[in-house]
Image: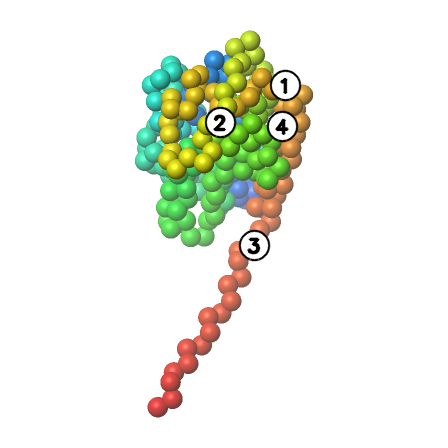
Amino acid sequence: MPSWDICTSAEIGELVRSGMDMAVLPVGATEQHGPHLGTGTDTISAAWVAQQAGERTGVLILPAMPYGCSLGHTERWPGTVSLNPMTLTQVVLEVARWTLKSGIRRMIFFSGHATNAPSLSSAVLQLRYEEPRARFRQLGIWEVSPRVRDLYMRDGDDVHANRGETSVLLHAAPAMVRLEHVFDVPDVTPGRIWSYDMPSTTPTGVVGRPSEASAEDGAMMAGILVEDFAALLRAGLSEEWPQVPAAPAVRRPSP
């Protein structure tokens, strides 16, 4: 039973005592995803993949965080609710510190939203300093493996509500998809020097070709996502601490 919020306190304690010292915190967002996807796309996708992988590996899955750093969407389209970058870092730090009190010593912050990454990386740096005998990593859903990244980026590098995101939801949460409102928008960011907000790059809040999405494509993607994330979790459970070689002896100059 890998879901933290379904387990009782005693069950979590027993799992940790039995050797399960890893937990995954899915971190999503509540933001516009164009006219065809629900605002909880990034939360639902990350939480669904994490839960499926947790059931395969026994790794504990914490309740998903539904808010992230979505400032780049601005107020142009209704529905976005964003945290500031430093607020997101602080919230993740507090969740992690309390999770560690239950005996967890390995944590993955599993993000469904790209611009959560700086805040999550900052949290990792702080936690690594505070808890040097625990281990932390932040990971985007599209970063699970090279083949997962290739699937997500089939229609561009700076994608949003694209074929991949739409297909995954058609499989995992079809009620969140409105295919009758799909509208393709090409990625105009390659080769640019600067980073731009969403209203500067898309008229609809979409970047990519969601018209190519299908439930069959989503089932294929979901299978690969869960398989590769479960493999990553298993590797994380078995990974030993690095064996640091002894420092060379200091040679003092001859008198």
Residue 172: image tag: none
| Tag 1 residue | 214
In the image, residue 209 lies at what x, y percent? Answer: 55, 21
The residue shown at (46%, 74%) is 248
Give the class, few, some or many, for how many residues have Cα within 10 Å of label 1's Cα (few <14, many ≥20).
some
Amino acid marked by disc 2: Asp
Amino acid marked by disc 1: Ser
Sequence-first tag of 4 and 1: 1
Query: Is any atom of residue 35 visible in this view?
Result: yes
Q: Quadrant of the C terminus?
A: bottom left
The residue shown at (46%, 27%) is 188
The residue shown at (42%, 81%) is 251
Give the number of callouts: 4
**Front disc: 2 or 3:** 2
CA separation, marks 2 and 4? 24 Å
Sequence-first tag of 4 and 3: 4
In the image, residue 132 lies at what x, y percent? Answer: 42, 52
CA separation, marks 3 and 1? 41 Å
Assess whether mark 4 and mark 2 are in contact (beta carbons under 8 angstroms).
Answer: no
Label 4 element class: helix
| Tag 4 residue | 222
**Front disc: 4 or 3:** 4
Amino acid marked by disc 4: Ala
| Tag 3 residue | 240
Give the class, few, some or many, for how many residues have Cα within 10 Å of label 4's Cα (few <14, many ≥20).
many
Query: Is any atom of residue 62 visible in this view?
Result: no
| Tag 2 residue | 187
Assess whether mark 3 and mark 4 are in contact (beta carbons under 8 angstroms).
Answer: no
Sequence-first tag of 2 and 3: 2
Left or right for 93, reference 107: left
In the image, residue 122 lies at what x, y percent? Answer: 38, 42
CA separation, marks 4 and 3? 29 Å
